[in-house]
């Protein structure tokens, strides 16, 4: 299962780390600092993007089976 986590802050990172133990996880956030911290600890794919651009969600998230919002 492919899971997208929106937000890589304290909560989003914790969710991503837990879910990555069993699933393929990608984390999305605008903060390069948050994404870098997550990437240093794990092999989770990290994508920098502005999550306030709701009109881009359909294209951005189409390939994921589950989306978790942690923003």
Image (spheres, rainbow, N blue to C red):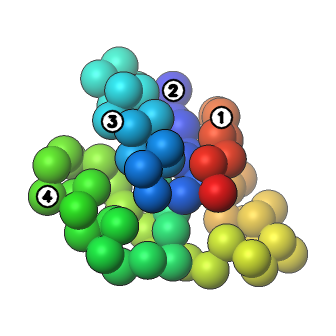
Tell me which label, 4 or 2, sits earlier in the chain: 2
Q: Nearer the viewer, residue 12 or 24?
A: 12
Tell me which label, 4 or 3, sits earlier in the chain: 3
43 sits to left or right of 11: left
- Residue position marked by numbered label 2 in the rendering: 1
The 10 Å Cα crowd at callout 3, few under 14, some 14 to 19, many 20 or more, is some
- Residue position marked by numbered label 3 in the rendering: 17
Tell me which label, 1 or 4, sits earlier in the chain: 4
As drawn, the label of residue 66 is 1
Q: Secondary structure at mark 4?
A: helix
Q: Nearer the viewer, mark 1 or mark 4?
A: 4
Q: Nearer the viewer, residue 8 or 23?
A: 8
Tell me which label, 2 or 1, sits earlier in the chain: 2
Q: Is residue 35 visible?
A: yes
As drawn, the label of residue 40 is 4
Q: CA distance from mark 3 to mark 1?
A: 15 Å
Q: Secondary structure at mark 1?
A: strand
Q: Nearer the viewer, mark 3 or mark 2?
A: 3
Q: Position of residue 71 (x, y in %)?
A: 64, 57
Q: CA distance from mark 1 to mark 4?
A: 24 Å
């Amino acid at each position: 299962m492919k899971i997208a986590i929106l937000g890589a802050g304290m909560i989003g990172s914790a969710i991503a780390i837990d879910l990555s133990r069993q699933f393929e996880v990608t984390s999305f956030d605008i903060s390069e600092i948050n994404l870098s911290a997550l990437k240093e600890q794990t092999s989770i794919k990290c994508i920098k993007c502005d999550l306030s651009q709701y009109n881009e969600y359909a294209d951005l998230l189409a390939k994921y089976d589950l989306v978790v919002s942690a923003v």
